[in-house]
Image (spheres, rainbow, N blue to C red):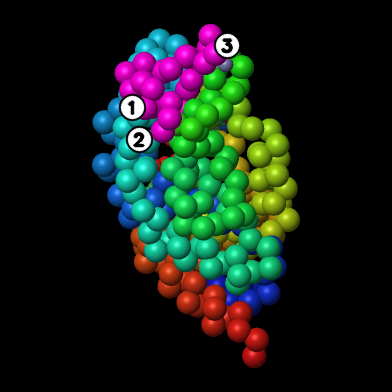
């Protein structure tokens, strides 16, 4: 890790925060990979692929019903809340999240891209119409409800093998390529194309800060690595940023 120069933060105007499941861990939501992760108990290909939904729509729908319940009960934690303040600490801040739990938005972050979609909406697999996931679940918890077009509703998330929304992805890549500070928080940085944002930002010369108790494939590129839970590290970093960015 290169020695860290706080001037990189002091002078940054365009900042991207790239978050993953680890940022919601302290809200009580499970991560996907690693000890205690969702994929330790379930196979992703049986739940988070279009093939799985075709094979057994009820199984997938029930699992997402459970995910929706746990997300609805969860509250934003100190990491989500501190990141809301970053919008007033930096002239331009964008949070790019892989999370589908809606916690950044509920915390109050306004400048947000949800690259893997959202668990809070259901989308018709045939006509693309969307509706509130809670309402769709209230209609049926066992099988996905039918749309008026005859298609089935599914969660409005991005499964393995599916393309990310093109407009959302290209905006994310543009922002990563033009920011001065790129902070990844709570992501294993293994799922593409989202993880590619880190490389793009680094290549374009952004200062790269990684917040994760465990190393990732990109840790060696980090200018600063904070090996601590997001709920501790982000509020602490926020204090430092406030100090660093105070006009002297
Ligand atoms: C803490 C903490 C604390 C713990 N504080 N931190 C290139 C190479 C190889 C494969 C591919 C490739 N390009 C594309 C692929 C295929 C695939 C892919 O990437 N596979 C890899 C696994 C190898 N990608 C796709 O399929 C994507 N689509 C695509 O590429 O389309 C083109 C295409 C078309 C046809 C065929 C092939 C390609 C789509 C990916 C969609 C991912 N969807 C999911 C599910 C969303 C819905 C749902 O939630 O159910 O998104 S999978 C899951 O992983 C979820 C997450 O957003 C995503 C990333 O996970 P994340 O957030 O990083 O979580 P974890 O659990 O991995 O990590 C948590 C981290 O937190 C850990 O590091 C902990 O240490 C840390 N942590 N406590 C801070 N307190
Ligand atoms: Zn429809």
Cα–Cα span, label 1 and label 3 = 24 Å
Cα–Cα span, label 2 and label 1 = 6 Å
Q: Which residue is mark 2?
A: 67
Would the CB of label 1 be found within 8 Å of ligand 1?
Answer: no
Residue 117 in the image, given as x and y percentages of width and height: 54, 36
Q: Which residue is mark 3?
A: 149
Would the CB of label 2 be found within 8 Å of ligand 1?
Answer: yes
Q: Earlier in the sequence, mark 3 or mark 2?
A: 2
Which mark's residue is nearer the viewer, 3 or 2? 3
Secondary structure beneath dot 1 equals: helix
Secondary structure beneath dot 2 equals: helix
Would the CB of label 3 be found within 8 Å of ligand 2?
Answer: yes
Image-quadrant location for residue 35: top left
Disc 2 + disc 1, Cβ < 8 Å? yes
Disc 1 + disc 3, Cβ < 8 Å? no
Q: Which residues are magenta?
A: 134-155
Q: Earlier in the sequence, mark 1 or mark 3?
A: 1
Residue 48 in the image, given as x and y percentages of width and height: 43, 25
Residue 73 visible in rendering? yes
């Amino acid at each position: 890790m290169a020695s860290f120069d706080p001037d990189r933060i002091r002078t940054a105007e365009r900042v991207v925060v790239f978050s993953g499941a680890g940022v919601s861990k302290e809200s009580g939501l499970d991560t996907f990979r690693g000890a205690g992760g969702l994929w330790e108990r379930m196979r992703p290909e049986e739940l988070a692929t279009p093939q799985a939904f075709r094979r057994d729509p009820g199984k997938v729908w029930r699992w997402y019903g459970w995910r929706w319940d746990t997300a609805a009960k969860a509250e934003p934690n100190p990491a989500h809340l501190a990141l809301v303040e970053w919008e007033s600490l930096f002239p331009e801040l964008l949070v790019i999240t892989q999370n589908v739990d809606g916690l950044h938005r509920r915390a109050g972050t306004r400048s947000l891209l949800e690259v893997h979609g959202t668990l809070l909406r259901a989308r018709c697999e045939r006509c693309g119409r969307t509706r509130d996931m809670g309402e769709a679940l209230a209609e049926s918890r066992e099988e996905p409800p039918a749309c008026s077009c005859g298609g089935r509703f599914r969660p409005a998330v991005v499964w393995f093998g599916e393309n990310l929304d093109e407009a959302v992805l290209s905006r994310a890549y543009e922002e990563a390529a033009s920011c001065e500070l790129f902070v990844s928080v709570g992501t294993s940085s293994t799922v593409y194309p989202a993880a590619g944002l880190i490389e793009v930002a680094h290549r374009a010369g952004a200062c790269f800060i990684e917040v994760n108790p465990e190393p990732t494939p990109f840790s060696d590129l980090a200018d600063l690595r904070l090996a601590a839970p997001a709920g501790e590290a982000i509020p602490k970093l926020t204090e430092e940023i406030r100090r660093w960015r105070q006009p002297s």
